[in-house]
Image: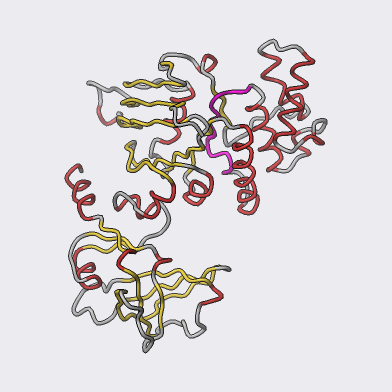
Amino acid sequence: MSSVAQIELIGVRKVFGSEFGGDLRNRVVAVDHADLAIADGELFAILGPSGSGKTTLLRMIAGFEQPTAGTIKLGGRDVTALPPARRDTNTVFQQYALFPHMTVAQNVEYGLRVRGVGKPERRQRAAEALEMVRLTGQAGRKPAELSGGQQQRVALARALVGRPRVLLLDEPLGALDLKLREQMQVELKAIQREVGITFVIVTHDQDEALTLCDRLVVLNEGRIEQLGPAREVYENPANRFVADFVGTSNVLDGDSAHAVLGRRGTFAIRPERVAVLEPDAPVPAGQHSVRAEVAEVVYAGPVTRVAATVTGVGTLAAPPRLTATLLSAEASTALTHGAPVVLAWPDSAVRDLTEQSNDLEEES
Protein backbone atom coordinates (compact mmCIF):
# COMPACT_ATOMS: atom_id res chain seq x y z
CA MET A 1 0.00 0.00 0.00
CA SER A 2 1.36 3.42 -0.99
CA SER A 3 1.44 6.35 1.42
CA VAL A 4 0.38 8.67 -1.41
CA ALA A 5 -3.24 9.83 -1.07
CA GLN A 6 -5.49 8.43 -3.78
CA ILE A 7 -8.57 10.18 -2.36
CA GLU A 8 -8.57 13.53 -0.55
CA LEU A 9 -11.54 15.32 0.97
CA ILE A 10 -10.84 18.84 2.12
CA GLY A 11 -13.53 20.61 4.16
CA VAL A 12 -16.29 18.68 2.39
CA ARG A 13 -19.81 19.62 3.44
CA LYS A 14 -23.16 18.44 2.10
CA VAL A 15 -26.45 20.10 3.00
CA PHE A 16 -29.81 18.93 1.71
CA GLY A 17 -32.27 21.81 1.65
CA SER A 18 -31.31 25.46 1.83
CA GLU A 19 -27.88 26.19 3.27
CA PHE A 20 -28.76 29.83 3.76
CA GLY A 21 -32.25 31.17 4.32
CA GLY A 22 -35.44 29.27 3.56
CA ASP A 23 -37.14 26.91 5.98
CA LEU A 24 -34.39 25.60 8.25
CA ARG A 25 -36.64 22.74 9.32
CA ASN A 26 -36.10 21.23 5.86
CA ARG A 27 -32.32 21.55 6.06
CA VAL A 28 -30.27 18.40 6.73
CA VAL A 29 -26.50 18.57 7.19
CA ALA A 30 -25.54 15.13 5.86
CA VAL A 31 -21.75 15.66 5.94
CA ASP A 32 -20.17 18.37 8.05
CA HIS A 33 -16.68 19.59 7.07
CA ALA A 34 -15.02 16.24 6.42
CA ASP A 35 -11.24 16.15 6.04
CA LEU A 36 -10.00 12.77 4.90
CA ALA A 37 -7.09 11.19 3.01
CA ILE A 38 -7.17 7.59 1.73
CA ALA A 39 -3.94 6.07 0.47
CA ASP A 40 -3.38 4.42 -2.89
CA GLY A 41 -4.01 0.68 -2.53
CA GLU A 42 -5.72 1.00 0.84
CA LEU A 43 -8.76 -0.99 1.97
CA PHE A 44 -10.71 1.69 3.81
CA ALA A 45 -14.08 1.53 5.60
CA ILE A 46 -16.61 4.29 6.23
CA LEU A 47 -18.52 3.17 9.31
CA GLY A 48 -21.55 4.68 11.00
CA PRO A 49 -25.18 4.16 11.98
CA SER A 50 -28.09 4.85 9.63
CA GLY A 51 -28.31 8.56 8.85
CA SER A 52 -24.68 9.25 9.76
CA GLY A 53 -23.77 10.47 6.24
CA LYS A 54 -21.62 7.54 5.15
CA THR A 55 -23.45 6.79 1.87
CA THR A 56 -23.64 10.50 1.05
CA LEU A 57 -19.87 10.71 1.53
CA LEU A 58 -19.35 7.76 -0.81
CA ARG A 59 -21.71 9.23 -3.42
CA MET A 60 -19.77 12.51 -3.38
CA ILE A 61 -16.51 10.63 -3.99
CA ALA A 62 -18.19 8.82 -6.89
CA GLY A 63 -19.68 12.03 -8.29
CA PHE A 64 -23.35 11.11 -7.83
CA GLU A 65 -23.73 13.97 -5.33
CA GLN A 66 -22.12 17.40 -5.47
CA PRO A 67 -20.73 18.82 -2.22
CA THR A 68 -22.20 22.06 -0.91
CA ALA A 69 -18.67 23.14 0.00
CA GLY A 70 -15.15 21.74 -0.02
CA THR A 71 -12.85 19.95 -2.46
CA ILE A 72 -12.59 16.32 -3.59
CA LYS A 73 -9.37 15.08 -5.20
CA LEU A 74 -8.64 11.74 -6.84
CA GLY A 75 -5.02 10.94 -7.54
CA GLY A 76 -4.15 14.57 -6.75
CA ARG A 77 -6.62 15.91 -9.36
CA ASP A 78 -9.53 18.13 -8.34
CA VAL A 79 -12.68 16.27 -9.45
CA THR A 80 -15.20 18.17 -7.33
CA ALA A 81 -17.23 19.34 -10.32
CA LEU A 82 -16.69 16.31 -12.59
CA PRO A 83 -19.49 13.80 -13.33
CA PRO A 84 -19.06 10.10 -12.43
CA ALA A 85 -18.07 9.09 -15.96
CA ARG A 86 -15.03 11.40 -15.81
CA ARG A 87 -13.73 10.03 -12.51
CA ASP A 88 -11.49 6.97 -12.40
CA THR A 89 -13.85 5.15 -10.04
CA ASN A 90 -16.43 2.38 -10.14
CA THR A 91 -19.21 1.65 -7.66
CA VAL A 92 -20.76 -1.60 -6.43
CA PHE A 93 -24.14 -1.08 -4.78
CA GLN A 94 -25.97 -3.33 -2.32
CA GLN A 95 -28.44 -4.22 -5.07
CA TYR A 96 -26.14 -5.63 -7.72
CA ALA A 97 -28.36 -4.56 -10.68
CA LEU A 98 -27.24 -7.38 -12.95
CA PHE A 99 -29.06 -7.69 -16.28
CA PRO A 100 -31.18 -10.85 -15.91
CA HIS A 101 -31.35 -11.54 -19.67
CA MET A 102 -27.56 -11.44 -20.09
CA THR A 103 -25.03 -14.11 -19.24
CA VAL A 104 -22.42 -13.55 -16.58
CA ALA A 105 -19.80 -12.77 -19.24
CA GLN A 106 -22.13 -10.31 -21.01
CA ASN A 107 -22.86 -8.55 -17.73
CA VAL A 108 -19.15 -8.16 -17.03
CA GLU A 109 -18.42 -6.97 -20.59
CA TYR A 110 -21.28 -4.48 -20.68
CA GLY A 111 -19.40 -1.39 -19.49
CA LEU A 112 -16.57 -2.04 -21.93
CA ARG A 113 -19.05 -2.44 -24.79
CA VAL A 114 -20.65 0.92 -23.94
CA ARG A 115 -17.20 2.50 -24.04
CA GLY A 116 -16.57 1.08 -27.50
CA VAL A 117 -13.93 -1.50 -26.56
CA GLY A 118 -13.57 -4.10 -29.31
CA LYS A 119 -14.99 -7.60 -28.84
CA PRO A 120 -11.67 -9.51 -28.60
CA GLU A 121 -10.28 -7.16 -25.94
CA ARG A 122 -13.44 -6.99 -23.87
CA ARG A 123 -13.81 -10.77 -23.88
CA GLN A 124 -10.23 -11.18 -22.75
CA ARG A 125 -10.61 -8.57 -20.01
CA ALA A 126 -13.94 -10.07 -18.88
CA ALA A 127 -12.33 -13.51 -18.67
CA GLU A 128 -9.49 -12.06 -16.58
CA ALA A 129 -11.97 -10.32 -14.26
CA LEU A 130 -14.01 -13.51 -13.80
CA GLU A 131 -10.84 -15.46 -13.04
CA MET A 132 -9.97 -12.82 -10.46
CA VAL A 133 -13.24 -13.38 -8.61
CA ARG A 134 -13.05 -17.17 -9.12
CA LEU A 135 -16.04 -17.47 -11.48
CA THR A 136 -14.33 -18.69 -14.65
CA GLY A 137 -16.66 -21.64 -15.03
CA GLN A 138 -19.83 -19.56 -14.67
CA ALA A 139 -19.39 -17.23 -17.67
CA GLY A 140 -22.28 -18.70 -19.68
CA ARG A 141 -24.85 -18.78 -16.87
CA LYS A 142 -27.59 -16.23 -16.15
CA PRO A 143 -27.68 -14.30 -12.84
CA ALA A 144 -30.79 -16.19 -11.68
CA GLU A 145 -28.78 -19.41 -11.82
CA LEU A 146 -26.20 -18.11 -9.35
CA SER A 147 -26.13 -17.93 -5.56
CA GLY A 148 -26.14 -14.56 -3.77
CA GLY A 149 -22.40 -14.72 -3.20
CA GLN A 150 -21.76 -15.54 -6.85
CA GLN A 151 -23.94 -12.61 -7.97
CA GLN A 152 -21.97 -10.35 -5.67
CA ARG A 153 -18.74 -11.52 -7.29
CA VAL A 154 -20.18 -10.89 -10.77
CA ALA A 155 -20.93 -7.31 -9.69
CA LEU A 156 -17.34 -7.03 -8.46
CA ALA A 157 -15.96 -8.37 -11.73
CA ARG A 158 -18.09 -5.90 -13.70
CA ALA A 159 -16.69 -3.06 -11.60
CA LEU A 160 -13.10 -4.29 -11.81
CA VAL A 161 -13.06 -4.99 -15.56
CA GLY A 162 -12.80 -1.26 -16.30
CA ARG A 163 -9.58 -1.16 -14.24
CA PRO A 164 -10.54 1.81 -12.06
CA ARG A 165 -8.06 3.31 -9.63
CA VAL A 166 -10.75 3.39 -6.93
CA LEU A 167 -13.52 0.88 -6.23
CA LEU A 168 -16.39 2.14 -4.08
CA LEU A 169 -18.64 -0.42 -2.36
CA ASP A 170 -21.90 0.64 -0.70
CA GLU A 171 -23.00 -2.03 1.82
CA PRO A 172 -21.86 -4.70 -0.68
CA LEU A 173 -22.53 -7.65 1.64
CA GLY A 174 -25.70 -6.38 3.29
CA ALA A 175 -28.04 -8.65 1.31
CA LEU A 176 -26.17 -11.86 2.18
CA ASP A 177 -26.83 -14.21 5.09
CA LEU A 178 -24.36 -14.27 7.98
CA LYS A 179 -22.27 -17.27 6.93
CA LEU A 180 -22.00 -16.17 3.30
CA ARG A 181 -21.22 -12.60 4.40
CA GLU A 182 -18.32 -13.87 6.50
CA GLN A 183 -17.02 -15.92 3.55
CA MET A 184 -17.28 -12.93 1.22
CA GLN A 185 -15.38 -10.73 3.67
CA VAL A 186 -12.41 -13.06 3.27
CA GLU A 187 -12.91 -13.10 -0.53
CA LEU A 188 -13.08 -9.31 -0.75
CA LYS A 189 -9.89 -8.88 1.23
CA ALA A 190 -8.08 -11.40 -0.97
CA ILE A 191 -9.35 -9.78 -4.19
CA GLN A 192 -8.31 -6.32 -3.00
CA ARG A 193 -4.85 -7.58 -2.14
CA GLU A 194 -4.57 -9.22 -5.57
CA VAL A 195 -5.68 -6.24 -7.68
CA GLY A 196 -3.95 -3.66 -5.44
CA ILE A 197 -6.37 -0.80 -6.08
CA THR A 198 -8.04 1.39 -3.49
CA PHE A 199 -11.23 -0.09 -2.02
CA VAL A 200 -13.60 2.13 -0.03
CA ILE A 201 -16.39 0.22 1.71
CA VAL A 202 -19.44 1.77 3.38
CA THR A 203 -20.93 -0.32 6.15
CA HIS A 204 -22.89 -0.06 9.39
CA ASP A 205 -21.53 -3.46 10.51
CA GLN A 206 -18.69 -2.90 13.00
CA ASP A 207 -17.41 -6.48 12.73
CA GLU A 208 -17.29 -6.19 8.94
CA ALA A 209 -15.30 -2.95 9.10
CA LEU A 210 -12.85 -4.33 11.65
CA THR A 211 -12.42 -7.58 9.69
CA LEU A 212 -11.90 -5.99 6.27
CA CYS A 213 -10.16 -2.67 6.52
CA ASP A 214 -6.67 -1.27 6.99
CA ARG A 215 -8.14 1.92 8.41
CA LEU A 216 -11.63 3.18 9.09
CA VAL A 217 -13.49 6.39 9.79
CA VAL A 218 -16.44 6.53 12.19
CA LEU A 219 -19.20 8.99 11.25
CA ASN A 220 -22.00 10.31 13.44
CA GLU A 221 -24.55 12.87 12.28
CA GLY A 222 -22.27 13.87 9.41
CA ARG A 223 -19.20 14.44 11.57
CA ILE A 224 -16.00 12.43 11.76
CA GLU A 225 -15.76 11.04 15.29
CA GLN A 226 -12.53 9.07 14.81
CA LEU A 227 -10.16 8.08 12.02
CA GLY A 228 -7.39 5.53 12.26
CA PRO A 229 -6.30 1.89 12.02
CA ALA A 230 -9.00 -0.60 12.99
CA ARG A 231 -7.10 -1.84 16.06
CA GLU A 232 -6.49 1.71 17.29
CA VAL A 233 -10.15 2.72 16.91
CA TYR A 234 -11.34 -0.39 18.71
CA GLU A 235 -8.83 -0.42 21.55
CA ASN A 236 -8.60 3.36 22.03
CA PRO A 237 -12.01 4.89 21.19
CA ALA A 238 -11.86 8.67 20.96
CA ASN A 239 -15.14 9.29 22.80
CA ARG A 240 -18.24 7.65 24.24
CA PHE A 241 -19.99 7.39 20.88
CA VAL A 242 -17.13 5.39 19.33
CA ALA A 243 -16.79 3.22 22.44
CA ASP A 244 -20.51 2.38 22.28
CA PHE A 245 -20.78 1.99 18.50
CA VAL A 246 -17.61 0.13 17.56
CA GLY A 247 -17.98 -3.18 19.35
CA THR A 248 -19.38 -3.27 22.88
CA SER A 249 -18.14 -1.36 25.90
CA ASN A 250 -18.93 -1.06 29.57
CA VAL A 251 -19.28 2.72 29.89
CA LEU A 252 -19.20 4.11 33.42
CA ASP A 253 -19.72 7.72 34.45
CA GLY A 254 -20.78 9.84 37.42
CA ASP A 255 -21.68 7.90 40.58
CA SER A 256 -21.33 4.56 38.77
CA ALA A 257 -17.71 5.32 37.83
CA HIS A 258 -16.97 6.42 41.40
CA ALA A 259 -18.55 3.24 42.84
CA VAL A 260 -16.71 0.87 40.49
CA LEU A 261 -13.42 2.65 39.79
CA GLY A 262 -13.12 4.99 42.76
CA ARG A 263 -12.97 8.10 40.57
CA ARG A 264 -15.37 10.33 38.71
CA GLY A 265 -15.44 10.89 34.97
CA THR A 266 -16.39 8.81 31.94
CA PHE A 267 -14.62 5.52 31.33
CA ALA A 268 -14.95 2.51 28.99
CA ILE A 269 -13.91 -1.11 29.55
CA ARG A 270 -14.20 -3.71 26.79
CA PRO A 271 -16.07 -6.85 27.95
CA GLU A 272 -13.33 -9.22 26.79
CA ARG A 273 -10.92 -7.53 29.22
CA VAL A 274 -13.14 -8.38 32.21
CA ALA A 275 -12.46 -11.68 34.01
CA VAL A 276 -15.19 -13.46 35.97
CA LEU A 277 -13.79 -15.15 39.09
CA GLU A 278 -15.22 -17.33 41.82
CA PRO A 279 -16.07 -15.29 44.99
CA ASP A 280 -13.11 -16.73 46.94
CA ALA A 281 -10.61 -16.83 44.05
CA PRO A 282 -7.46 -14.69 44.36
CA VAL A 283 -7.43 -11.55 42.22
CA PRO A 284 -4.33 -11.34 39.99
CA ALA A 285 -1.77 -8.79 41.14
CA GLY A 286 -2.26 -5.31 39.75
CA GLN A 287 -5.91 -5.85 38.79
CA HIS A 288 -8.92 -3.89 39.97
CA SER A 289 -11.90 -5.94 41.17
CA VAL A 290 -15.48 -5.58 42.38
CA ARG A 291 -17.98 -8.02 43.81
CA ALA A 292 -21.05 -8.67 41.71
CA GLU A 293 -24.06 -10.90 41.18
CA VAL A 294 -24.78 -12.64 37.87
CA ALA A 295 -27.83 -11.12 36.16
CA GLU A 296 -27.75 -12.82 32.75
CA VAL A 297 -25.73 -15.55 31.03
CA VAL A 298 -25.95 -15.71 27.22
CA TYR A 299 -24.35 -18.65 25.42
CA ALA A 300 -23.32 -17.66 21.87
CA GLY A 301 -21.38 -20.67 20.65
CA PRO A 302 -17.66 -19.92 20.93
CA VAL A 303 -18.23 -17.18 23.52
CA THR A 304 -20.45 -16.69 26.54
CA ARG A 305 -21.58 -13.24 27.65
CA VAL A 306 -22.08 -12.65 31.35
CA ALA A 307 -23.88 -9.56 32.66
CA ALA A 308 -23.38 -8.97 36.39
CA THR A 309 -24.70 -6.30 38.76
CA VAL A 310 -22.07 -4.76 41.03
CA THR A 311 -22.89 -5.21 44.73
CA GLY A 312 -21.85 -3.29 47.83
CA VAL A 313 -22.13 0.15 46.22
CA GLY A 314 -24.35 1.78 48.83
CA THR A 315 -27.54 3.60 47.96
CA LEU A 316 -27.19 4.02 44.20
CA ALA A 317 -30.66 4.01 42.62
CA ALA A 318 -29.39 1.83 39.75
CA PRO A 319 -26.36 -0.31 40.70
CA PRO A 320 -23.80 -0.52 37.86
CA ARG A 321 -23.98 -3.55 35.57
CA LEU A 322 -20.91 -4.82 33.75
CA THR A 323 -20.67 -7.32 30.90
CA ALA A 324 -17.85 -9.81 30.41
CA THR A 325 -17.17 -11.90 27.31
CA LEU A 326 -15.63 -15.30 28.02
CA LEU A 327 -14.54 -18.20 25.84
CA SER A 328 -17.33 -20.73 26.27
CA ALA A 329 -14.80 -23.52 26.82
CA GLU A 330 -13.50 -21.61 29.85
CA ALA A 331 -16.83 -20.42 31.27
CA SER A 332 -17.77 -22.06 34.58
CA THR A 333 -21.00 -24.03 34.76
CA ALA A 334 -21.58 -22.29 38.11
CA LEU A 335 -22.37 -19.06 36.26
CA THR A 336 -26.10 -18.97 36.80
CA HIS A 337 -28.58 -16.20 37.59
CA GLY A 338 -27.96 -14.80 41.07
CA ALA A 339 -24.56 -16.44 41.56
CA PRO A 340 -21.96 -14.30 43.40
CA VAL A 341 -18.80 -13.54 41.41
CA VAL A 342 -15.82 -11.23 41.36
CA LEU A 343 -15.16 -9.12 38.25
CA ALA A 344 -11.55 -8.15 37.63
CA TRP A 345 -9.62 -6.24 34.98
CA PRO A 346 -6.16 -4.65 34.55
CA ASP A 347 -5.76 -0.88 34.76
CA SER A 348 -4.72 -0.89 31.10
CA ALA A 349 -8.25 -2.02 30.18
CA VAL A 350 -9.79 1.25 31.39
CA ARG A 351 -10.09 3.92 28.70
CA ASP A 352 -10.59 7.44 30.11
CA LEU A 353 -13.13 9.32 27.95
CA THR A 354 -13.74 12.18 30.39
CA GLU A 355 -12.29 15.07 28.38
CA GLN A 356 -13.75 13.84 25.12
CA SER A 357 -17.21 13.43 26.67
CA ASN A 358 -17.05 16.94 28.10
CA ASP A 359 -16.08 18.31 24.68
CA LEU A 360 -19.09 16.60 23.07
CA GLU A 361 -21.44 18.01 25.72
CA GLU A 362 -20.10 21.53 25.13
CA GLU A 363 -20.56 21.19 21.34
CA SER A 364 -24.17 20.02 21.73
Please tell me which residue lies in front, 106 or 198: 198
Q: Kindly give the residue lying farthest to the bottom in the view shown.
A: 280
Any magenta on residue 169?
A: yes
Q: Is residue 79 shown above or below 351? A: above
Q: Is residue 41 above or below residue 321?
A: above
Which region shows up in magenta?
Answer: 163-174
Q: Does residue 301 appear to the left or right of 83 in the view shown?
A: right
Please determine whether, in this image, residue 353 is positioned above or below residue 108: below
**Residue 354 percent location from the top left of the image:** 21, 55
Q: Position of residue 275 (x, y in %)?
A: 40, 74
Confirm whether residue 70 shows in the render: yes
- Name the foreground residue: 286 vs 234: 286
Horizontal side, residue 88 vs residue 142: left or right: left
Residue 212 against residue 121 in the figure, above or below:
below
* Residue 15 appears in the rendering: no
At a point 52% along the width and 83% down the height, the residue shown is: 333
Residue 218 at x, y percent in the picture: 38, 43
Q: Quadrant of the C terminus?
A: top left
Q: Residue 323 appears in which quarter of the rendering?
A: bottom left
Write the residue at 27% across / 74% down. 319
What residue is shown at x 34% (from left), y 51% (from top)?
Answer: 237
Q: Residue at x 30, y 49 (%)?
A: 238
The image's colouring method is secondary structure
Observer-nearest of 52 and 21: 52
Q: Is residue 271 left or right of residue 163?
A: left
Q: Quadrant of residue 130?
A: top right
